[in-house]
Image (cartoon, coloured by chain):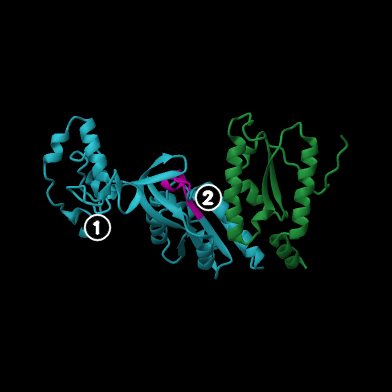
Chain colours: A cyan, B green
Amino acid sequence: MIVGNRKSLEEILQMVKPYKKILLLGCRECITVCAAGGEREVAVLASELKMSRAKDGQEIEIKEFTLERQCDFEYIDQIKPFVDEYEAVVSMACGAGIQYTSERFPKKVVLPAINTTFLGVALEYGVWAERCQGCGECILHLTAGVCPVARCAKSLFNGPCGGSSTGKCEVNKDTDCAWQLIVDRLKAQGQLEKYEEVILEKDWSTSRDGGPRKRVREDLRLS
Amino acid sequence: MRLNYPTFIKVIKVPCTGRVDVLTILKAFEAGVDGVYLAGCLEGECHFLKGNLRARKRVGYARQLLKEIGIEPERLEMYNLSSAQGQRFAAIANEMAEKIRALGPSPIRKAKDAFKA
């Protein structure tokens, strides 16, 4: 899922300072699952904003609304009947959702309440960790299902480096060395001979280096 | 026992303090109450195993939120007592009432009253 973190109340208050009537827009997808911008978090932020503003004698009217998804226009358009009643939209979706909401209503000010952080997994309730960087060319079959792009601080293709110590990365002692994980798992799978193979340099043009990416499936297009 | 505790303390019954969400607490403050405390079962004696421990964690989180808003976090407290400790219930109620009295009205209520005036 896409994992995000809510911005500080102070930062959000600063953004909404000029407005008296806002639409607080949550998303029921990834950002709900990572407990940052779902219906619950929308309610909590609305309450925080109302109290902060009331305290300063500048009351604010907030409509709470959570869409099924903010990355699909069919859902975003559900706010069409009432979005103009609000001076600004504060989106609690990931960066994609925030941008798409702004794109659908270009005349409306859309403000971000979330810092989108990574593509990751839930390790336990309340703990999420990065697993994928969306590089556009998966090599997990070569690395025993552990991604060196996302999980090695240097994105090394033939690791580990000298900064690997007792299975941890020198960048952070709580971070596993991706290459230690790869070697351990190759061993567990009886495929350690794969470690002998040199992985060639990566073509980063499928990643961000090739500019913004787009995917088209002609058979699914309606027009 | 015929123990007294301040009449302005409103008891809201929940099946377990584990039922109390951060939003429940925030809504109370938003409504203008001066303080909130949770009275959970003794630690280790939760009928649902961890309800009171979870409540304590949520109280910790809600206190951070209150601080961010500018409300004294001391206005929110977590207590543990058993249903057989009537004396302690009254003592806690009085203790919390004293603490809140010392802090004065909540900044939210103060602002709301000023707005009305």
Amino acid type at image mark 1: Arg
Residue found at the very far bottom of the displayed protein: A18
Q: Which mark is residue A41?
A: 2
**Left or right, A161 with reference to B62:** left
* Residue A193, placed above or below residue A61: above
Label 2 and label 1 in one chain? yes
**Chain on which label 2 sits:** A
**Left or right, B86 with reference to A22:** right
Q: Return the residue at label 1.
A: A208
Could you say where residue A60 lies in the image, as x and y percent from the top left? 61, 63
Q: Quadrant of residue B52?
A: top right
Residue A30 drawn in magenta: yes
**Chain on which label 1 sits:** A
Q: Quadrant of residue B21?
A: top right
Q: CA distance from mark 2 to mark 1?
A: 31 Å
Q: Residue at x 64, y 68 (%)?
A: A58
Q: Residue at x 75, y 49 (%)?
A: B96
SS for dot 1: helix
**Left or right, A122 with reference to A84:** left
Residue A189 in view in this figure: yes
Q: Quadrant of the N terminus of chain B?
A: top right
Region in magenta: A25-35
In this view, the residue in front, A47 or B70, is: B70
Q: Given contact means CB atoms under 8 Å apart, are the residues at marks 2 and 1 in contact?
A: no
